[in-house]
Image: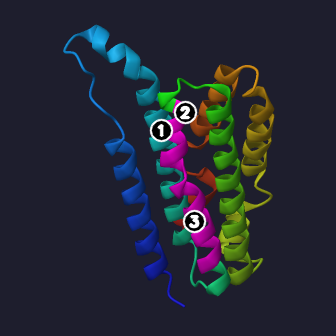
Amino acid sequence: MNKTRMEAFSDGVVAILITIMVLELRPPEGTTWQALKPIIPVFFAYVLSFVYIGIYWANHHHMLQLTERVNGAILWANLHLLFWLSMVPFVTAWMGEHHFEPVPTALYGIVLICAAAAYTILQRALIKEQGPGSRLASAIGPDRKGLVSLAIYLIALPIAFYRPWISDLLYALVALTWLVPDSRIEHRIREG
């Protein structure tokens, strides 16, 4: 099965998610710098989520560059990932509008954990279809970076109920580690 339709569908969903998030941003009531203060948490939540969706889009794109074919299991794994990414606008709005309170911050973390797990499932389905000797399999290797990210999310989750700002910093830390597209895959793409 050709991967082009899956890529196009995924790109469309990601574009819609970013559009939904930006539409949730409301301008301040006033016209002074002080009028911006109440929307700062909403803006920061938006920026963090935009970065996360961008990271997933870029890494998804790079991973598929090393993919020759897809099957039904891969299509469903991709939909699983898109489902969790589609929850990002909701948790972003809730967390931002409630100034990073514990429960919205924890739910944001749960969505991040589920999206990371779904990405890992997709990655494994792709490797299984391409074969253990494929360029994708050798590029991913043991995926320590992915496992460390999941561990940080799991640490951040209970902390959200006591010190949500620490969880937010941990979420941002994971985003920073993934901001540059996965160098393991970039290297394999350049090799041809």
Question: Which residue position is annotated with label 2?
Answer: 95
Question: Is 16 left, or right, of 134 in this rendering?
Answer: left
Residue occupying image coordinates x 39% and y 17%: 38
- Asked whether disc 2 touches disc 3, contact meaning CB atoms under 8 Å apart, the reply is no
**Cα gap from disc 3 to disc 1, whole angstroms:** 29 Å
Q: Earlier in the sequence, mark 3 or mark 1?
A: 3
Kind of residue at disc 2: Met
Quarter holding residue 120: bottom right
Please tell me the numbered disc located at residue 140. none
Per the model, the C-alpha gap separating discs 1 and 2 is 6 Å
- Residue 13 in the image, given as x and y percentages of width and height: 43, 64
Instruction: Magenta stretch: give its range.
Output: 75-95
Residue found at x 65% / y 37%: 174
Question: For the residue carrying disc 1, how many other residues have a C-alpha within 10 Å: few (<14), some (14-19), or many (20+)?
Answer: many
Mark count: 3
Residue at screen point 40% across, 73% down: 8
Which residue is label 3 attached to?
63
Question: In the image, is 98 to the left or to the right of 127?
Answer: left
| Residue type (three-letter) at the residue carrying disc 3 | Met
The residue beneath circle 1 is 93
Q: Answer yes or no: is residue 118 visible.
A: yes
